[in-house]
Image: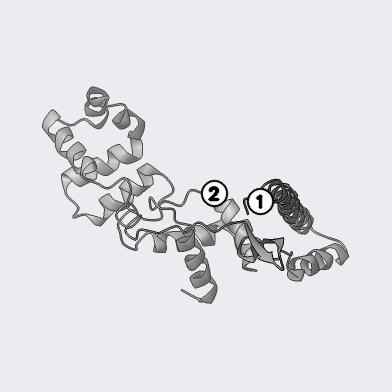
């Protein structure tokens, strides 16, 4: 892979959930690559890189659906009549398979009952959640971090907001500059106009989020301050 494809591959690996799937549509990933990684690519390139990522272990990882996950695993196996039939069922009759319409499957694929049983057995031995064996291996110990601290300074109660729970949030200037650059361009194409709208929506959402966090902190501070003085003797 070239440098750009490698970066796309890393982004796709980072998009894999605990079950081993990529749940987000390729178009959303394409937008995120442009917005967060400054990589402007197309769906075809992402699809191509995704196929390479799907060759990684555990088999079935980075699939976008259950039938794709099973297909990836089946293609890794030695090509036998049972595997061929399993792939055909998975590709052409997945809904009938999930509904256990075995007589219909037998008729549609023109196979004997024994052949169908062998094919279904192959599918049932596959792992529907290839990421499951990795998720939860490391137990995370969660420590409770208080929102506030109360100290007695010179006989007076002093309330402070815990800095760990109140980081200073801001929108990166890079995105504001990007928006200005697109806005100032003359004869904008449709894709550039769409990009301007996309960035503006994201910036507005980010600013709203920051304001909401500040409002939450202020509300908590006022509330805790009232509690502190109401329970002054206790503290």
Residue 233: assigned label = 1
Tell me the element at label 2. Answer: loop
Identify the colour scheme used: one colour
Relative image position of residue 120 (x, y in whole percent): 20, 37
Query: Which of the pair 63/160 is nearer the observer?
Result: 160
154 relative position to 25: left or right: right
228 relative position to 74: left or right: right
Q: Earlier in the sequence, mark 2 or mark 1?
A: 2
Relative image position of residue 3 (x, y in whole percent): 52, 76
Query: Seen from this angle, which residue lies furthest bottom?
Result: 3
Tell me the element at label 1. Answer: loop
Residue with the mark numbered 2: 25
Image quarter of residue 152:
bottom right
Specify few, some or many for label 2: CA neighbours under 10 Å numbering under 14, 14-19, or 20 or more: few
Relative image position of residue 84 (x, y in whole percent): 23, 45
Q: Is residue 119 visible in the rendered structure shown here?
A: yes
Residue that appears at 64% across and 62% down:
162
91 relative position to 227: left or right: left
Residue that appears at 73% across and 51% down:
225
Residue that appears at 24% across and 46% down:
126
Relative image position of residue 220 (x, y in whole percent): 70, 50
Residue 60: assigned label = none
Q: Answer yes or no: do the residues labelled 2 and 1 have beta carbons within 8 Å? A: no
Q: Is residue 167 visible in the rendered structure shown here?
A: no
Q: In this rendering, which labeled residue sits more in front, label 2 or label 1?
A: 1
Q: Please tell me how many numbered marks the rendered image carries.
A: 2
Query: Which of the pair 231/119 is nearer the observer?
Result: 231
Residue that appears at 78% across and 57% down:
196
Q: CA distance from mark 2 to mark 1?
A: 57 Å
């Amino acid at each position: 892979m070239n440098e750009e494809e490698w970066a796309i591959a890393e982004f796709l690996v980072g998009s894999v959930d605990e079950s081993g799937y990529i749940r987000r549509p390729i178009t959303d990933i394409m937008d995120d690559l442009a917005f967060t990684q400054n990589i402007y690519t197309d769906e075809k390139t992402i699809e191509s890189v995704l196929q390479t990522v799907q060759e990684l272990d555990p088999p079935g990882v980075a699939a976008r659906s259950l039938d794709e996950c099973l297909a990836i695993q089946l293609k890794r196996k030695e090509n036998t009549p049972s595997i061929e039939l399993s792939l055909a069922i998975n590709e052409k009759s997945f809904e009938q398979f999930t509904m256990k319409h075995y007589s219909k499957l037998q008729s549609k694929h023109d196979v004997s009952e024994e052949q169908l049983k062998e094919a279904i057995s192959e599918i049932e031995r596959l792992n529907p959640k290839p990421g499951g064996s990795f998720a939860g291996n490391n137990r995370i110990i969660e420590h409770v971090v208080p929102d506030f601290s109360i100290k007695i300074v010179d006989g007076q109660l002093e309330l402070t907001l815990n800095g760990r729970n109140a980081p200073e949030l801001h929108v990166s200037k890079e995105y504001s500059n990007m928006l200005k650059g697109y806005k100032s361009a003359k004869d904008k194409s449709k894709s550039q106009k769409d990009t301007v709208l996309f960035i503006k929506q994201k910036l507005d959402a980010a600013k709203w989020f920051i304001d909401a966090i500040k409002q939450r902190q202020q509300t908590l501070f006022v509330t805790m301050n009232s509690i502190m003085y109401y329970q002054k003797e206790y503290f």
